[in-house]
Image (tube, helix red, strand yellow):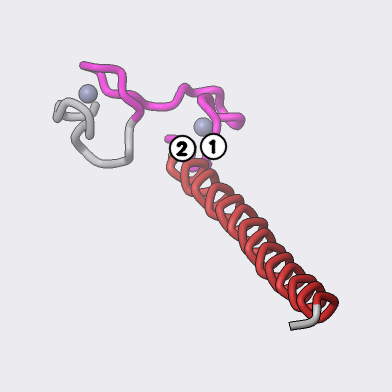
């Protein structure tokens, strides 16, 4: 086999390898963006679960109602944030 033909074949192999490597790198970048989107969605869900309905009728996302100033209801036994159900999700005590 002539030497320059062998060199040409080697160059072609290298190009093919580089292309495969680039495709893999692009895929990793896409995966990273995908997980970022998933994290954003999880944060959104956590934000929603923080919301509670104040006695004044306002839906509040912070610790205190910005309409009447009432604090977010919490379990009288363990202090866990109320989930809206009649019993504490942490210790099972009846909510006020
Ligand atoms: Zn209120
Ligand atoms: Zn509790």
Disc 2 target residue: 50
Q: x, y (%) of residue 33?
A: 64, 55
Q: Is residue 12 above or below residue 81?
A: below
Which residue is depicted at the point 32% across and 38% down? 83
Q: Quadrant of residue 28?
A: bottom right
Q: Quadrant of residue 61?
A: top right
Q: Quadrant of ligand 2?
A: top left
Q: Residues within 10 Å of mark 2 (few under 14, many from 20)?
A: some
The range drawn in magenta is 53-81
Which residue is depicted at the point 47% across and 40% down? 51
Callouts 2 and 1 close, C-beta under 8 Å: yes
Q: x, y (%) of residue 41?
A: 54, 52
Q: Earlier in the sequence, mark 2 or mark 1?
A: 2
Q: x, y (%) of residue 67?
A: 60, 32
Which residue is depicted at the point 30% across and 18% down? 79
Judged from the image, the secondary structure of the residue bearing numbered disc 2 is loop
Q: Residues within 10 Å of mark 1 (few under 14, many from 20)?
A: some
72 inside magenta stretch = yes
76 relative to 57 in the view: left or right: left
Disc 1 target residue: 61
92 relative to 10 in the view: left or right: left
Q: How many marks?
A: 2
Q: Is residue 35 above or below residue 14?
A: above
Which secondary structure dominates the residues rendered in magenta? loop
Q: x, y (%) of residue 40?
A: 58, 49
Which residue is depicted at the point 71% across and 73% down? 13
Q: Nearer the viewer, residue 86 or 13?
A: 13
């Amino acid at each position: 086999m002539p030497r320059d033909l062998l060199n040409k074949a080697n160059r072609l192999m290298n190009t093919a390898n580089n292309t495969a490597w680039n495709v893999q790198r692009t895929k990793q970048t896409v995966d990273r963006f995908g997980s970022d989107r998933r994290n954003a969605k999880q944060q959104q869900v956590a934000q929603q679960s923080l919301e509670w309905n104040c006695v004044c009728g306002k839906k509040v996302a912070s610790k205190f109602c910005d309409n009447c100033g009432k604090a977010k209801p919490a379990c009288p036994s363990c202090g866990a944030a109320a989930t809206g159900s009649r019993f504490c999700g942490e210790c099972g005590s009846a909510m006020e």
